[in-house]
Image (cartoon, rainbow, N blue to C red):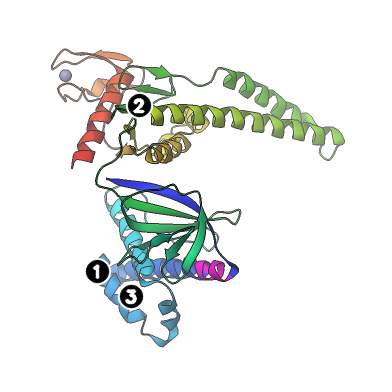
Amino acid sequence: MQIGYKARLYPTSKQRNIFCRMFGSCRFVYNYFLAERIRSYKEDGISLSYNKTASLLTALKTDKDHLWLNECDSMALQESLRNLDRAYQNFFKGNAGFPRFHSRHGRQVFRTRNQNNSIRIAGSSIRIPKVGFVRYKGLKDFEGRILNATVSLSPSGKFFISLCVETDDIKLNNGGCIIGLDVGIKEFYTDSNGNSVSDPKTYHRHEKKLVREHRKLSRKQKGSSNRNRQRIKVALQHKKIANIRKDFLHKRSFKLANENQVVCVEDLNVRGMLRNHYLAKSISDVSWSEFFRQLEYKTAKRGGILVRVPTFYPSSQTCSICGYQNPIVKDLSVRKWICPNCKAHHSRDRNAATNILNKGLEMLAS
Ligand SMILES: [Zn+2]
Protein backbone atom coordinates (compact mmCIF):
# COMPACT_ATOMS: atom_id res chain seq x y z
CA MET A 1 0.00 0.00 0.00
CA GLN A 2 1.23 3.47 -0.83
CA ILE A 3 0.80 6.40 1.53
CA GLY A 4 1.57 10.08 0.95
CA TYR A 5 3.29 12.33 3.46
CA LYS A 6 3.76 16.05 3.15
CA ALA A 7 6.19 18.30 4.98
CA ARG A 8 7.40 21.86 4.82
CA LEU A 9 11.02 22.33 3.72
CA TYR A 10 13.36 24.99 5.05
CA PRO A 11 16.11 25.21 2.43
CA THR A 12 19.14 27.47 2.77
CA SER A 13 19.42 30.23 0.20
CA LYS A 14 21.88 28.10 -1.77
CA GLN A 15 19.45 25.18 -1.71
CA ARG A 16 16.60 27.48 -2.76
CA ASN A 17 18.61 28.41 -5.83
CA ILE A 18 19.20 24.77 -6.71
CA PHE A 19 15.50 24.02 -6.29
CA CYS A 20 14.58 26.90 -8.58
CA ARG A 21 17.04 25.70 -11.22
CA MET A 22 15.51 22.21 -10.95
CA PHE A 23 12.01 23.62 -11.46
CA GLY A 24 13.31 25.42 -14.55
CA SER A 25 15.20 22.44 -15.98
CA CYS A 26 12.27 20.09 -15.52
CA ARG A 27 9.92 22.59 -17.13
CA PHE A 28 12.38 23.03 -19.99
CA VAL A 29 12.53 19.28 -20.61
CA TYR A 30 8.75 19.01 -20.48
CA ASN A 31 8.23 21.84 -22.96
CA TYR A 32 11.13 20.85 -25.22
CA PHE A 33 9.80 17.32 -25.64
CA LEU A 34 6.20 18.43 -25.95
CA ALA A 35 7.34 20.54 -28.93
CA GLU A 36 9.37 17.58 -30.18
CA ARG A 37 6.42 15.20 -29.95
CA ILE A 38 4.17 17.67 -31.77
CA ARG A 39 6.78 18.21 -34.49
CA SER A 40 7.47 14.51 -34.93
CA TYR A 41 3.78 13.77 -35.32
CA LYS A 42 3.21 16.63 -37.78
CA GLU A 43 6.26 16.07 -39.96
CA ASP A 44 6.81 12.34 -39.80
CA GLY A 45 3.46 11.06 -38.54
CA ILE A 46 5.29 9.35 -35.67
CA SER A 47 4.06 9.45 -32.11
CA LEU A 48 7.10 9.46 -29.82
CA SER A 49 6.97 7.05 -26.89
CA TYR A 50 8.35 7.69 -23.43
CA ASN A 51 11.35 5.45 -24.13
CA LYS A 52 12.13 7.30 -27.33
CA THR A 53 12.04 10.69 -25.61
CA ALA A 54 14.21 9.31 -22.78
CA SER A 55 16.93 8.30 -25.23
CA LEU A 56 16.62 11.66 -27.04
CA LEU A 57 17.10 13.34 -23.67
CA THR A 58 20.31 11.40 -23.04
CA ALA A 59 21.58 12.62 -26.42
CA LEU A 60 20.46 16.19 -25.71
CA LYS A 61 22.49 16.25 -22.50
CA THR A 62 25.71 15.76 -24.47
CA ASP A 63 24.88 18.63 -26.83
CA LYS A 64 27.14 21.59 -26.02
CA ASP A 65 24.25 24.05 -25.76
CA HIS A 66 22.43 21.87 -23.27
CA LEU A 67 25.25 20.72 -21.01
CA TRP A 68 23.64 22.67 -18.16
CA LEU A 69 20.95 19.98 -18.01
CA ASN A 70 23.54 17.73 -16.35
CA GLU A 71 23.45 19.95 -13.29
CA CYS A 72 19.91 18.76 -12.66
CA ASP A 73 19.01 15.45 -11.06
CA SER A 74 18.61 13.04 -14.00
CA MET A 75 15.75 11.20 -12.26
CA ALA A 76 13.81 14.45 -12.03
CA LEU A 77 14.27 15.11 -15.75
CA GLN A 78 13.04 11.60 -16.55
CA GLU A 79 10.02 12.16 -14.33
CA SER A 80 9.24 15.24 -16.44
CA LEU A 81 9.14 13.01 -19.50
CA ARG A 82 6.92 10.54 -17.67
CA ASN A 83 4.64 13.41 -16.74
CA LEU A 84 4.45 14.44 -20.36
CA ASP A 85 3.70 10.87 -21.38
CA ARG A 86 0.93 10.67 -18.77
CA ALA A 87 -0.54 13.92 -20.12
CA TYR A 88 -0.60 12.33 -23.59
CA GLN A 89 -2.13 9.08 -22.28
CA ASN A 90 -4.87 11.06 -20.50
CA PHE A 91 -5.53 12.94 -23.70
CA PHE A 92 -5.74 9.71 -25.73
CA LYS A 93 -8.16 8.21 -23.20
CA GLY A 94 -10.34 11.30 -23.43
CA ASN A 95 -9.79 12.22 -19.76
CA ALA A 96 -8.03 15.49 -20.48
CA GLY A 97 -7.36 18.06 -23.17
CA PHE A 98 -4.24 18.14 -25.31
CA PRO A 99 -1.07 18.63 -23.20
CA ARG A 100 -0.15 22.27 -22.71
CA PHE A 101 3.18 23.99 -22.40
CA HIS A 102 4.14 24.80 -18.83
CA SER A 103 4.60 28.45 -18.05
CA ARG A 104 7.32 30.00 -15.93
CA HIS A 105 4.50 31.59 -13.95
CA GLY A 106 2.67 28.32 -13.34
CA ARG A 107 3.15 25.74 -10.63
CA GLN A 108 6.79 25.33 -9.58
CA VAL A 109 7.28 21.62 -9.09
CA PHE A 110 9.49 18.64 -9.80
CA ARG A 111 9.39 15.01 -8.86
CA THR A 112 12.27 12.64 -8.40
CA ARG A 113 12.55 8.95 -7.64
CA ASN A 114 14.39 7.22 -4.84
CA GLN A 115 17.26 5.12 -6.10
CA ASN A 116 19.74 3.42 -3.78
CA ASN A 117 18.60 5.54 -0.85
CA SER A 118 19.19 8.79 -2.73
CA ILE A 119 16.16 10.16 -0.87
CA ARG A 120 16.30 9.50 2.86
CA ILE A 121 15.56 11.04 6.20
CA ALA A 122 18.32 11.77 8.69
CA GLY A 123 17.14 13.40 11.88
CA SER A 124 15.56 16.74 11.11
CA SER A 125 16.78 16.77 7.51
CA ILE A 126 15.83 14.98 4.36
CA ARG A 127 18.29 14.18 1.63
CA ILE A 128 17.30 15.17 -1.88
CA PRO A 129 19.51 14.30 -4.90
CA LYS A 130 21.73 17.17 -6.10
CA VAL A 131 20.49 19.36 -3.25
CA GLY A 132 21.76 17.55 -0.18
CA PHE A 133 20.24 17.55 3.29
CA VAL A 134 17.36 19.99 3.65
CA ARG A 135 15.72 20.83 6.94
CA TYR A 136 12.03 19.94 7.23
CA LYS A 137 9.16 20.15 9.69
CA GLY A 138 5.83 18.42 10.03
CA LEU A 139 6.61 14.89 8.95
CA LYS A 140 5.46 12.23 11.35
CA ASP A 141 7.31 8.96 11.86
CA PHE A 142 6.64 6.38 9.23
CA GLU A 143 7.87 2.96 8.29
CA GLY A 144 8.35 1.87 4.75
CA ARG A 145 10.26 2.63 1.62
CA ILE A 146 10.25 6.07 0.00
CA LEU A 147 9.31 5.61 -3.65
CA ASN A 148 9.45 9.19 -4.87
CA ALA A 149 9.45 12.78 -3.71
CA THR A 150 7.72 15.83 -5.14
CA VAL A 151 9.14 19.24 -4.29
CA SER A 152 6.98 22.29 -4.88
CA LEU A 153 7.06 26.01 -4.22
CA SER A 154 3.83 27.69 -3.14
CA PRO A 155 2.89 31.12 -4.51
CA SER A 156 3.67 32.54 -1.06
CA GLY A 157 7.26 31.31 -1.37
CA LYS A 158 7.16 28.22 0.86
CA PHE A 159 8.79 24.96 -0.17
CA PHE A 160 7.04 21.64 0.40
CA ILE A 161 7.90 18.02 -0.14
CA SER A 162 5.45 15.15 -0.68
CA LEU A 163 6.78 11.68 -0.16
CA CYS A 164 5.17 8.60 -1.60
CA VAL A 165 5.92 5.75 0.80
CA GLU A 166 5.31 2.04 0.29
CA THR A 167 4.39 0.03 3.36
CA ASP A 168 3.65 -3.68 3.71
CA ASP A 169 0.85 -3.43 6.21
CA ILE A 170 -0.95 -0.49 7.63
CA LYS A 171 -1.90 0.03 11.24
CA LEU A 172 -5.60 -0.35 11.72
CA ASN A 173 -6.78 2.38 14.01
CA ASN A 174 -10.42 2.42 13.11
CA GLY A 175 -11.50 -1.18 12.85
CA GLY A 176 -10.85 -1.23 9.11
CA CYS A 177 -14.17 0.44 8.25
CA ILE A 178 -14.78 1.15 4.60
CA ILE A 179 -17.13 3.69 3.10
CA GLY A 180 -18.13 5.07 -0.29
CA LEU A 181 -19.28 8.65 -0.85
CA ASP A 182 -21.47 10.07 -3.56
CA VAL A 183 -21.24 13.84 -3.66
CA GLY A 184 -24.29 15.56 -5.03
CA ILE A 185 -26.17 18.74 -5.63
CA LYS A 186 -29.01 18.01 -3.28
CA GLU A 187 -26.94 16.72 -0.39
CA PHE A 188 -23.29 17.52 0.20
CA TYR A 189 -22.72 13.79 0.16
CA THR A 190 -24.52 10.49 0.76
CA ASP A 191 -22.51 7.53 2.02
CA SER A 192 -22.85 3.83 1.28
CA ASN A 193 -24.50 3.29 4.68
CA GLY A 194 -27.33 5.56 3.57
CA ASN A 195 -26.44 8.62 5.66
CA SER A 196 -26.68 12.05 4.05
CA VAL A 197 -24.86 15.20 5.04
CA SER A 198 -26.13 18.61 3.89
CA ASP A 199 -24.46 21.96 3.55
CA PRO A 200 -24.25 24.02 6.74
CA LYS A 201 -27.57 25.79 7.33
CA THR A 202 -26.08 29.23 7.91
CA TYR A 203 -24.41 29.07 4.54
CA HIS A 204 -27.31 30.09 2.33
CA ARG A 205 -28.36 32.91 4.62
CA HIS A 206 -24.89 34.44 4.42
CA GLU A 207 -24.85 33.87 0.70
CA LYS A 208 -28.09 35.79 0.21
CA LYS A 209 -26.60 38.61 2.23
CA LEU A 210 -23.54 38.60 0.00
CA VAL A 211 -25.72 39.00 -3.09
CA ARG A 212 -27.50 41.93 -1.43
CA GLU A 213 -24.28 43.67 -0.43
CA HIS A 214 -22.92 43.15 -3.93
CA ARG A 215 -25.95 44.81 -5.45
CA LYS A 216 -25.52 47.76 -3.11
CA LEU A 217 -21.90 48.06 -4.15
CA SER A 218 -22.77 48.30 -7.82
CA ARG A 219 -25.08 51.24 -7.09
CA LYS A 220 -22.41 53.30 -5.29
CA GLN A 221 -20.59 55.95 -7.25
CA LYS A 222 -17.10 55.06 -8.38
CA GLY A 223 -14.32 56.52 -6.25
CA SER A 224 -16.65 57.63 -3.47
CA SER A 225 -15.85 56.83 0.14
CA ASN A 226 -19.26 55.19 0.37
CA ARG A 227 -18.22 52.78 -2.29
CA ASN A 228 -15.00 52.02 -0.51
CA ARG A 229 -16.82 51.24 2.70
CA GLN A 230 -19.20 48.97 0.82
CA ARG A 231 -16.31 47.21 -0.85
CA ILE A 232 -14.86 46.32 2.53
CA LYS A 233 -18.26 45.07 3.64
CA VAL A 234 -18.47 42.77 0.61
CA ALA A 235 -14.95 41.49 1.20
CA LEU A 236 -15.76 40.68 4.83
CA GLN A 237 -18.89 38.84 3.79
CA HIS A 238 -16.85 36.82 1.29
CA LYS A 239 -14.41 35.95 4.03
CA LYS A 240 -17.21 34.91 6.36
CA ILE A 241 -18.61 32.51 3.78
CA ALA A 242 -15.18 31.09 3.06
CA ASN A 243 -14.65 30.46 6.78
CA ILE A 244 -17.98 28.70 7.20
CA ARG A 245 -17.10 26.50 4.26
CA LYS A 246 -13.59 25.77 5.53
CA ASP A 247 -14.82 24.88 8.97
CA PHE A 248 -17.48 22.59 7.55
CA LEU A 249 -15.09 20.77 5.22
CA HIS A 250 -12.51 20.23 7.96
CA LYS A 251 -15.05 18.86 10.41
CA ARG A 252 -16.54 16.43 7.90
CA SER A 253 -13.23 15.18 6.53
CA PHE A 254 -11.86 14.78 10.07
CA LYS A 255 -14.83 12.64 11.09
CA LEU A 256 -14.69 10.46 7.98
CA ALA A 257 -10.94 9.92 8.24
CA ASN A 258 -11.23 9.03 11.93
CA GLU A 259 -13.98 6.52 11.40
CA ASN A 260 -12.81 4.83 8.22
CA GLN A 261 -9.77 3.02 6.95
CA VAL A 262 -10.74 3.24 3.30
CA VAL A 263 -12.80 6.08 1.80
CA CYS A 264 -13.84 5.78 -1.84
CA VAL A 265 -14.98 8.81 -3.82
CA GLU A 266 -15.75 9.58 -7.42
CA ASP A 267 -12.82 11.26 -9.15
CA LEU A 268 -14.98 14.14 -10.34
CA ASN A 269 -14.20 15.89 -13.53
CA VAL A 270 -15.26 19.17 -12.00
CA ARG A 271 -14.40 21.07 -15.13
CA GLY A 272 -16.81 18.95 -17.14
CA MET A 273 -19.61 19.40 -14.64
CA LEU A 274 -19.12 23.16 -14.42
CA ARG A 275 -20.01 23.48 -18.07
CA ASN A 276 -23.60 22.73 -17.15
CA HIS A 277 -24.59 26.13 -15.80
CA TYR A 278 -27.53 24.85 -13.74
CA LEU A 279 -25.17 22.85 -11.61
CA ALA A 280 -22.28 25.26 -11.74
CA LYS A 281 -23.13 27.35 -8.72
CA SER A 282 -23.78 24.48 -6.37
CA ILE A 283 -20.63 22.71 -7.43
CA SER A 284 -18.29 25.61 -7.03
CA ASP A 285 -19.95 26.34 -3.68
CA VAL A 286 -19.29 23.06 -2.06
CA SER A 287 -15.79 22.73 -3.47
CA TRP A 288 -15.42 18.99 -3.79
CA SER A 289 -11.82 19.05 -4.80
CA GLU A 290 -10.83 20.77 -1.56
CA PHE A 291 -12.87 18.24 0.40
CA PHE A 292 -11.17 15.32 -1.34
CA ARG A 293 -7.76 16.89 -0.82
CA GLN A 294 -8.41 17.10 2.91
CA LEU A 295 -9.77 13.57 3.01
CA GLU A 296 -6.68 12.34 1.21
CA TYR A 297 -4.14 13.67 3.66
CA LYS A 298 -6.26 13.03 6.72
CA THR A 299 -6.84 9.38 5.86
CA ALA A 300 -3.15 8.97 4.96
CA LYS A 301 -2.12 10.49 8.29
CA ARG A 302 -4.11 7.83 10.08
CA GLY A 303 -2.75 5.02 7.96
CA GLY A 304 -5.82 4.85 5.74
CA ILE A 305 -6.40 5.68 2.11
CA LEU A 306 -8.66 7.71 -0.15
CA VAL A 307 -9.49 5.93 -3.40
CA ARG A 308 -10.58 8.01 -6.38
CA VAL A 309 -12.80 6.07 -8.77
CA PRO A 310 -12.58 7.24 -12.41
CA THR A 311 -15.29 9.66 -13.53
CA PHE A 312 -16.40 7.78 -16.61
CA TYR A 313 -17.76 5.01 -14.40
CA PRO A 314 -21.60 5.45 -14.45
CA SER A 315 -22.09 5.12 -10.70
CA SER A 316 -25.65 6.44 -10.59
CA GLN A 317 -27.07 4.32 -13.37
CA THR A 318 -25.65 0.96 -12.37
CA CYS A 319 -27.53 -1.35 -10.02
CA SER A 320 -25.19 -1.99 -7.09
CA ILE A 321 -26.61 -5.49 -6.65
CA CYS A 322 -26.73 -7.03 -10.11
CA GLY A 323 -24.77 -4.55 -12.21
CA TYR A 324 -27.62 -3.76 -14.62
CA GLN A 325 -27.26 -0.35 -16.25
CA ASN A 326 -30.49 1.65 -16.18
CA PRO A 327 -30.36 4.65 -18.56
CA ILE A 328 -33.52 6.18 -17.06
CA VAL A 329 -31.51 7.16 -13.98
CA LYS A 330 -29.39 9.49 -16.10
CA ASP A 331 -32.14 12.04 -15.47
CA LEU A 332 -31.07 13.86 -12.30
CA SER A 333 -34.65 14.17 -11.10
CA VAL A 334 -34.98 10.39 -10.64
CA ARG A 335 -34.30 10.00 -6.90
CA LYS A 336 -35.64 6.47 -6.37
CA TRP A 337 -35.78 3.57 -8.80
CA ILE A 338 -36.38 -0.15 -9.01
CA CYS A 339 -33.89 -2.27 -10.93
CA PRO A 340 -35.74 -3.82 -13.92
CA ASN A 341 -33.41 -6.80 -13.77
CA CYS A 342 -33.22 -7.85 -10.11
CA LYS A 343 -36.13 -5.75 -8.75
CA ALA A 344 -33.98 -4.18 -6.04
CA HIS A 345 -35.20 -0.86 -4.65
CA HIS A 346 -32.62 1.89 -4.84
CA SER A 347 -32.24 5.39 -3.56
CA ARG A 348 -30.25 7.20 -6.19
CA ASP A 349 -27.43 8.53 -4.02
CA ARG A 350 -26.93 5.55 -1.75
CA ASN A 351 -26.81 3.20 -4.73
CA ALA A 352 -24.18 5.44 -6.34
CA ALA A 353 -22.16 5.52 -3.10
CA THR A 354 -22.27 1.72 -2.88
CA ASN A 355 -21.10 1.43 -6.48
CA ILE A 356 -18.23 3.84 -5.81
CA LEU A 357 -17.26 1.78 -2.77
CA ASN A 358 -17.35 -1.51 -4.72
CA LYS A 359 -15.36 -0.08 -7.59
CA GLY A 360 -12.82 1.45 -5.18
CA LEU A 361 -12.29 -1.86 -3.40
CA GLU A 362 -11.90 -3.56 -6.74
CA MET A 363 -9.20 -1.04 -7.67
CA LEU A 364 -7.42 -1.56 -4.35
CA ALA A 365 -7.40 -5.32 -4.84
CA SER A 366 -5.84 -5.20 -8.30
ZN1 LIG B 1 -30.34 -5.04 -10.22
Q: Amino acid at mark 1?
A: Asn
Report if residue 96 is visible in the image. Answer: yes
Q: Quadrant of the N terminus?
A: top left
Q: Position of residue 174 (x, y in %)?
A: 33, 29
Report the Cα–Cα distance between label 2 and label 1: 39 Å
Residue at 29 percent across and 40 percent down: it is 170
Q: Secondary structure at mark 1?
A: helix
- In this orientation, which residue lies closer to the viewer: 240 or 335? 240
Q: Secondary structure at mark 3?
A: helix
Res 84 quadrant in image:
bottom left
Dot 1 corresponds to which residue? 51
Q: Position of residue 92 (x, y in %)?
A: 27, 53
Report the Cα–Cα distance between label 2 and label 3: 44 Å
Label placed on residue 182:
2
> Number of labelled discs?
3
Residue at 44 percent across and 72 percent down: it is 130
Magenta-colored stretch includes residue 16: yes
Magenta-colored stretch includes residue 95: no
Crowdedness near tag 3: few (<14), some (14–19) or many (≥20) residues, C-alpha within 10 Å? many
Crowdedness near tag 2: few (<14), some (14–19) or many (≥20) residues, C-alpha within 10 Å? many
Q: Earlier in the sequence, mark 2 or mark 1?
A: 1
Q: Dominant secondary structure of the magenta stretch?
A: helix
Report the Cα–Cα distance between label 3 and label 1: 10 Å
Q: Which residues are magenta?
A: 14-20
Q: Are marks 2 and 3 in contact (CB under 8 Å)?
A: no
Q: Is residue 130 left or right of residue 354?
A: right
Q: In the figure, 79 relative to 360: above or below? A: below
Dot 3 corresponds to which residue? 57
Q: Quadrant of the C terminus?
A: top left
Q: Position of residue 244 (x, y in %)?
A: 59, 27
Q: Earlier in the sequence, mark 3 or mark 1?
A: 1
